[in-house]
Image: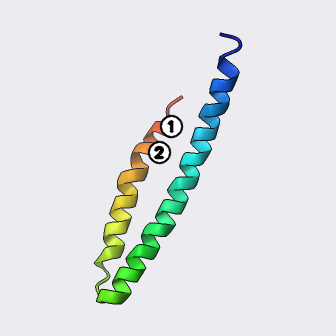
Amino acid sequence: MRNIIPPLLNDFISLRKDTALVGVLGAIKANQAAQIYASAVLDYSSFTVAAILFLILTIPLAVDAGRP
């Protein structure tokens, strides 16, 4: 157990950092896609859809991050 726990904790920390990075980059890409669609169609409801999708993806991550 003493040999297994430190590498597992390192992997867990790395996974948390990568999840945060992907969450930020995913929001940026969703916003860019909504902006491209809105400029082509002249309908700005795509920003609302991008925001709702972002919330659907991030709320479970935020709830899970608060648990020890």
Numbered label tally: 2
Question: Which structural element holds mark 1?
Answer: loop
Whether the residues at callouts 1 and 2 have beta carbons within 8 Å, the answer is: yes
Q: Quadrant of residue 50?
A: bottom left
Q: Which residue is painted at 59% across and 47% down in the image? A: 18
Q: Nearer the viewer, residue 23 or 7?
A: 7
Q: Which residue is painted at 68% across and 25% down in the image? A: 7
Cα–Cα gap, marks 1 and 2 = 7 Å
Q: Amino acid at mark 1?
A: Gly
Question: Which structural element holds mark 2?
Answer: helix
Measured as percent of width and height from the top left, residue 26 is found at 48, 61
Q: Amino acid at mark 2?
A: Ala
**Residue marked by disc 2:** 62
Q: Does 12 sit left or right of 63 as displayed?
A: right
- Depicted 21 relative to depicted 4: above or below: below
Measured as percent of width and height from the top left, residue 47 is found at 36, 74
Q: Which mark is residue 34?
A: none
Q: Which residue is painted at 35% across and 83% down in the image? A: 38
Measured as percent of width and height from the top left, residue 64 is found at 46, 37
Q: Quadrant of residue 5?
A: top right
User: Which quadrant is the C terminus positioned in?
Assistant: top right
Q: Does 37 sit left or right of 23 as displayed?
A: left
**Residue marked by disc 1:** 66
Q: Nearer the viewer, residue 56 or 29?
A: 29
